[in-house]
Image (tube, helix red, strand yellow):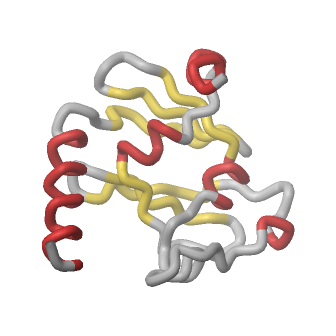
Amino acid sequence: MGYTELQMADARKRESVNSNLAAEKVEIDGQRILIKWSDGHQGVYEAKHLRISCGCAECIEEWSNRKLLDPATVPADIRAEDHLMVGKYAVQFLWSDSHYTGIYPFDVLRKLCQCDQCEENRD
């Protein structure tokens, strides 16, 4: 299977996962982001955690997947200024450090959840 076929297979897999999971409401509360998911889950995220986890081409080297963003350069008081829904599969945040190119697919956001329940399940 070639690279393009792998990308397409990954996109189809992501699309099927995302078709069952949707962010119903995104609320920015200072340095926290709260997401109400379609399955009833209440996601809690620290802004710095999400900003450092950005997977865009400015933050992650596209071919090697090497991190380009140095977490130490992200301000401790970073916050999401606003957000945009991207189709029916992702959220894009507009960060206080002027970064805005990252798109967070729903499945990725859900895995990054920092609520007590999700933290316990990771342990």
Residue 119 x, y percent position in the rendering: 64, 24
Q: Quadrant of residue 92?
A: bottom left
Q: 14 and 9: which one is in front?
A: 9
Residue 73 x, y percent position in the rendering: 82, 73
Q: Quadrant of the C terminus?
A: top right
123 relative to 64 in the view: left or right:
right
Q: Is residue 94 above or below residue 19?
A: below
Residue 82 x, y percent position in the rendering: 53, 57
Q: Quadrant of the N terminus?
A: bottom left
Rendered residue at 64%/73% (across/down): 67
Q: Is residue 64 above or below residue 92?
A: below
Rendered residue at 27%/33% (across/down): 21
Q: 28 and 50: which one is in front?
A: 50
53 relative to 83 in the view: left or right:
right
62 relative to 17 in the view: left or right:
right
Rendered residue at 20%/68% (across/down): 6
36 relative to 117 in the view: left or right:
left
Rendered residue at 54%/82% (across/down): 61
Q: Is residue 91 above or below residue 42?
A: below
Q: Is residue 22 above or below residue 86?
A: above
